[in-house]
Image (tube, helix red, strand yellow):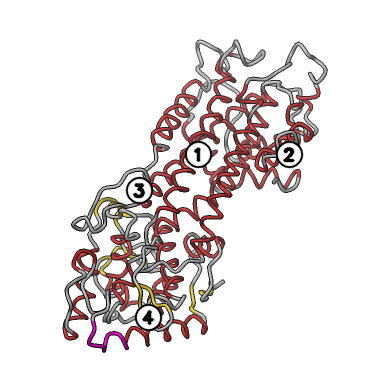
Amino acid sequence: MTVQVYVGPLSIEDVVAVARDGAPVALTDGALDAIDKARAVVEELAAATDPAYGISTGFGALATRHIPAEMREQLQRSLVRSHAAGSGPEVEREVVRALMLLRLSTLATGHTGIRRETAELMAALLSAGITPVVREYGSLGCSGDLAPLSHCALALMGEGDVRDASGTLMPAADALAAAGLTPVELKAKEGLALINGTDGMLGMLVMAITDLRMLLRTADIAAAMSVEAQMGTDRVFAAELQELRPQVGQGLSAANLRAVLAGSGVMASHREDMFHRVQDAYSLRCSPQVHGAARDTVEHAALVASRELASAVDNPVVVGDEVRSNGNFHGAPVAYVLDFLAIVAADAASISERRTDRFLDKARNHDLPPFLADDPGVDSGHMIAQYTQAAIVSEMKRLAVPASVDSIPSSAMQEDHVSMGWNAARKLRRSVDGLSRVVAIELLTAARALDLRRPLEPAPGTGAVVDLLRSSGVQGPGPDRYLSPEIETTVSLVQSGAVLAAVEEEIGELQ
């Protein structure tokens, strides 16, 4: 369905629909009216004799130069061309689409002074599936994501490279012509309005929040499978114990563990055996505390994202009948939570890897074969799968080092403190991917261990994961085989949400 861009904020679901699902976009009549009203203010100031920043002056450290009327269209073109200075690999299509949509949302607030035809062309590119080529390096997160947004603005001018809806690389002019679209000639302030925002880092934040909400519930499932297959206890997850420390995420995570473990024949087999388990290791016993803290941090990030989605980030901005300079383009609010989430992802992956490692050590896995191998010594079982987890976790720890504490002055010291929010977002995307892989390997290993516990029956919830893996071509215990394809299959099932869906279909929605 078409996502409507109003004067008000988009939702997280709107952003994901356009970025990932390719939903088309339309500006509402109210948004177009607001755009027209702000544009009238800009045109009045452009006709005035007094200079107005961003309309009849240069930019940044060059803001003191008054630009004559006959050179102002050249000023806008030059701004976009010079700022489209990115380098490195292409940024993912979903990131560019999110960036464009969020910029369009700011344009629709009526505070930027853009013309309606320019805003409508951006909506048309999104709807036609035309995606400008944006390079990975170039943004300092202040003034916003200048270089990435400039590459998008360049496409509106019919310049630079894009990929069409099929993914074919071509010149922007050719793609626009094929879609029946006409490039725009940017007028006063339009170039600046198109590039001065936090839209790239915000788009990546929104998608990371979406992914982490799903992955942390999947991590609860993985933790439950590990507790079950390692003959652990679920007593520590009791609601009355969680209420003694009323952290919201912790309580939700513990409730998920109880639900996923309910009805387990494995758990029932040793429930009264105090020799078998008095206290589990921290990686099992404290899973709700770690996963819950992670969830609470994600929800804090979602609060920041919701405020940013409701923002009109530009400089200068149209306020009433004035155009006023401001500092709202600074990416610090977004950059901080992007860094927080990288810490969250690294720690959730770390505890997952520790739970997995316990399966493989004969001294700690409670009567399972070493490394869950079919013939230990001849077979290595999941020994190296845990190495893969450890390698990913090690990288994620490095990625958890914050980008937002760094700042490199730019623009002749005019921009002397920058957020590095784009860099924080780029490394978070790698961290989220890493978390999905680490959790997948835990699920793969726990499923093998549960099969080795038979004839004891797993819980309906955990059994649903085992059944999903087996029906997807991931084999059960047996002699060593080529393991990488099975890992990748499990990763796909985690990332697509299929693991979570299989459990919820069996036992109901998790929290």
Direction from residue 239 to residue 134 in the image, left or right: left
Residue depicted at 20% across the width and 80% down the height: 72
Q: Is 164 positioned to the left or the right of 285 in the image?
A: left
Residue 111, position in %: x, y? 42, 76
Amino acid marked by disc 4: Glu
Q: Which element carries disc 2, helix, strand or loop? A: helix
Identify the mark at residue 423; answer none if there is no mark: 3
Establish if 417 lies above or below 256.
below
Considering the numbered disc 4 on the image, is that residue within a helix, a strand or a loop?
Answer: strand
Callout 1–callout 4 Cβ contact below 8 Å: no
Q: Secondary structure at mark 1?
A: helix
Looking at the picture, tell me which residue is in the foreground, 161 or 354: 354
Q: Name which of mark 2 and mark 1 comes first in the sequence.
A: 2
Q: Residue at x 16, y 85 (%)?
A: 70
Tell me if residue 33 comes above or below residue 148 in the rendering.
below
Question: How packed is label 2: few (under 14 Cα within 10 Å), some, or many (20 or more)?
Answer: many
| Mark closer to the chain start, 1 or 4 | 4
Q: Earlier in the sequence, mark 3 or mark 2?
A: 2
Reading the image, the residue beneath label 1 is: 345
Question: Which stretch did the figure color magenta?
Answer: 44-50
Instruction: Name the kind of residue labelled 1 in the image.
Output: Ala
Residue found 40% across the figure and 84% down from its top? 321
Q: Position of residue 55 (x, y in %)?
A: 27, 78
Residue with the mark numbered 2: 255
Q: Badge 4: how crowded within 10 Å, few (<14), some, or many (20+)?
A: some
Q: Amino acid at mark 3?
A: Asn
